[in-house]
């Protein structure tokens, strides 16, 4: 037994000293001192020993048990003391000022511009019902357009909204027509990430419904908004685009400000970046939300706020925006003024 005990002690000490995490040391404790350990079985076998052996091995086994417990506690303390954050309590609290995130800055700027144009800001849930994200936007479950927005479905039957367009439906239901709203917010898609695609990004929805609203009103608002946001002449182009909830639908692209239209990874070498799809709201969508289509028409747009921040601040890779890298964020100190 003496030999067996020597091996147990040396193995346990060797393994405990190698541990670098609390979970590891707790595993060693269970292995050498737990109910399934060799030591535990030896202690349990004491009751069947002769009085003489009990005396001899009882005190030896208990001594070893205490020794291993002590060793394991020491190792645990050593690990915990290393992971404690030490700080200097005399440091001034306001040594470093924070900064607004570039997306927060562009969201505020764009909504301020839209507010001056008479838009009201509304918001809706990020965890959304399938009805608002798809069906009420003329995208029934069998519609191939569902593939355009690869969706995160949740166990509770809801989904993470893939765009800010559900806010259109919620606003129509709540306020009816006429209406003029905008809704900035976070969206989620199960995307393959690259320089211009994130799985979590921001959009700004805009919607106007009134009598005699036409494509000219849409173009006027889009031009006014982008001119004020960029505060410089930026080439934009409007081309036909398909979205089941608008008819006609358009893609509004802006000339890539990273490469000035020459082509780069951010714009996938096209020189243009898809920024703000838009169009005249489909009559089915208006009717599903009880808007009188004989009296009212409307337009809607879905501005890619994250891409707008990229163009405005010449950020060539979208992934840095969600990275939480403080060195990057510090560059925006004071930008919000
Ligand atoms: C939509 O999401 C429509 N709801 C927009 C809309 C609203 C159309 C109202 C018509 C009327 P789209 O999937 O193209 O459309 O996304 C809109 C914009 O969001 C894109 O132009 C782009 O700027 C941005 N965007 C889309 N997916 C991503 C992504 N994975 N990462 C970053 N930005 C994205």
Image (tube, rainbow, N blue to C red):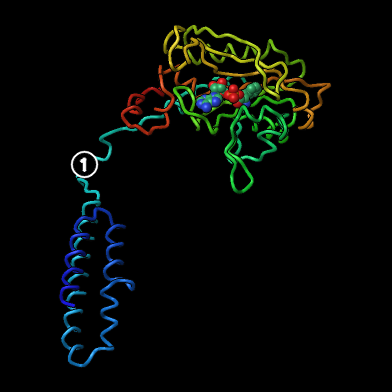
Neighbour class for label 1 at 10 Å: few (<14), some, many (≥20)? few
Quadrant of the image containing the N terminus: bottom left
Q: Point out residue 235 in the picture as x, y percentages from the top left corner.
A: 52, 7
Q: Position of residue 171 (x, y in %)?
A: 68, 32
Seen in the picture, residue 286 relative to 214 is either above or below; the reply is below
Q: Which residue occupies 55% across, 13% down?
A: 253
Secondary structure at badge 1 equals loop
Q: Quadrant of residue 13?
A: bottom left
Image location (x, y in percent) of residue 315 = 40, 20
Residue drawn 61% across and 19% down? 277
In the displayed structure, would residue 162 be above or below residue 271?
below
- Nearest the camera: 334 or 302? 302
Q: Is residue 148 or residue 287 the one in the foreground?
A: 148
Taking the image as shown, residue 311 lies to the left or right of residue 147, namely left
Residue visible at 39% across and 27% down in the picture: 320
- Where ligand 1 lies, by quadrant? top right
| Image quadrant where one finds the C terminus | top left
Q: Nearer the viewer, residue 165 or 157?
A: 157
- 265 vs 262: above or below: below
Residue closest to the eye, 202 or 101: 202
Whether residue 111 appears in this view of the structure is no
Q: Position of residue 131 (x, y in %)?
A: 70, 38
Residue placed furthest toward the right = 294
Q: Report the side of 194 relative to 303 (left or right).
A: left
All told, the count of numbered labels is: 1
**Does the Cβ of the disc 1 residue fall within 8 Å of ligand 1?**
no
Residue bearing mark 1:
91
Can residue 244 be seen here? yes
């Amino acid at each position: 037994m003496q030999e067996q005990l020597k091996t147990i002690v040396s193995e346990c000490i060797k393994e405990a000293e190698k541990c670098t995490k609390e979970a590891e040391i707790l595993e060693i404790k269970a292995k050498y001192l737990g109910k399934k350990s060799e030591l535990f079985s030896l202690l349990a076998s004491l009751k069947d020993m002769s009085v003489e052996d009990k005396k001899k091995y009882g005190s030896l086994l208990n001594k070893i048990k205490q020794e291993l417990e002590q060793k394991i506690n020491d190792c645990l303390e050593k690990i915990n003391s290393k992971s404690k954050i030490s700080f200097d309590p005399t440091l001034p609290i306001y040594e470093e000022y924070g900064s607004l995130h570039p997306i927060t800055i562009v969201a505020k700027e764009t909504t301020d511009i839209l507010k001056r144009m008479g838009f009201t800001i509304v918001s809706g849930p990020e965890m959304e019902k399938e009805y608002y994200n798809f069906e009420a936007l003329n995208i029934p479950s069998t519609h191939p357009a569902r593939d355009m927005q690869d969706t995160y479905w949740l166990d509770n039957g809801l989904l993470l909204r893939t765009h800010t367009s559900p806010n259109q439906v919620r606003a129509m239901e709540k306020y009816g027509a006429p209406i003029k709203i905008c809704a900035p917010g976070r969206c989620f898609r199960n995307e393959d990430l690259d320089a211009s695609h994130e799985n979590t990004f921001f959009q700004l929805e805009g919607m106007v419904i009134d009598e005699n609203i036409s494509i000219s009103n849409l173009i006027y608002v889009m031009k006014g908004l982008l001119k004020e946001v960029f505060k410089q002449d930026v080439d934009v182009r409007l081309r036909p685009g398909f979205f089941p909830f608008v008819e006609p639908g358009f893609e509004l692209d802006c000339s890539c400000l990273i490469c000035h239209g020459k082509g780069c990874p951010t714009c996938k070498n096209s020189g243009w970046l898809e920024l703000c799809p838009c169009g005249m709201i489909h009559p089915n969508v208006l009717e599903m939300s009880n808007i009188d289509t004989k009296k009212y028409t409307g337009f809607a747009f879905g501005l890619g706020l994250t891409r707008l921040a990229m163009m405005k601040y010449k950020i060539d890779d979208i992934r840095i925006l969600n990275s939480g890298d403080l060195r990057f964020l510090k560059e925006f100190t004071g930008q919000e003024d």
